[in-house]
Image (spheres, helix red, strand yellow):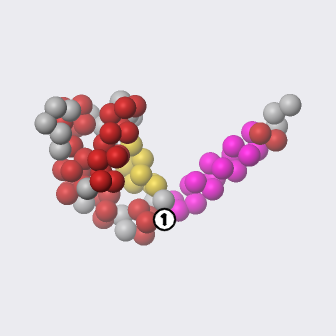
Amino acid sequence: MEKTLNCRNFALQLLAYGGVYIAGGLAAKLPQLVTHAEFKASFRSSAIMAGELRKIPVFLNANEESGLWGAAFYGQQQLNTP
């Protein structure tokens, strides 16, 4: 429940109407953690902000190496910066 609360609060802080992408090894190995109806219900369970939370889709990025690609891209940018 605490992870869902953190995810929900982060999405609201950013007003992430384009969506929240959950990635990482655990999510990729156990996608039902993110795709399960209970996660979605918990994510949207807010007496005050439920309307806003319904506007924010949640996606699963099942690529376990996506973080490495992001780090490699950032590193390449740093190397190309004068």
Reading the image, the residue beneath label 1 is 25
Q: Which residue is painted at 21% across and 43% down in the image?
A: 44
Please name whichever residue, 69 or 3, is drawn nearer the observer in this view of the structure: 3
The percent coordinates of residue 66 (x first, y second) are 56, 55
Q: Is residue 14 above or below residue 57?
A: above
Indicate the position of residue 16 as horizontal and vertical percent values. Answer: 38, 33
Q: Which quadrant is the C terminus positioned in? A: top right
Q: Residue furthest left?
A: 47
State the extent of the magenta-drawn residues as a range.
63-77
Image quarter of residue 31? bottom left
Residue 7 x %, y %: 35, 46
Q: Quadrant of residue 61?
A: bottom left
Identify the residue at the far front of this view: 2
Does the magenta stretch mainly form a helix, a strand or a loop? helix
Q: Nearer the viewer, residue 49 or 80?
A: 49
Is residue 54 shown in magenta? no
Q: What is the three-letter code of the residue carrying label 1?
A: Gly
Image quarter (top left, top right, bottom left or bottom right) of the N terminus: bottom left
Residue at image point 16% right, 32% down: 48
Is residue 64 visible from the viewing direction of this image? yes
Residue 64 highlighted magenta (yes or no): yes
Q: Residues within 10 Å of mark 1 (few under 14, many from 20)?
A: some
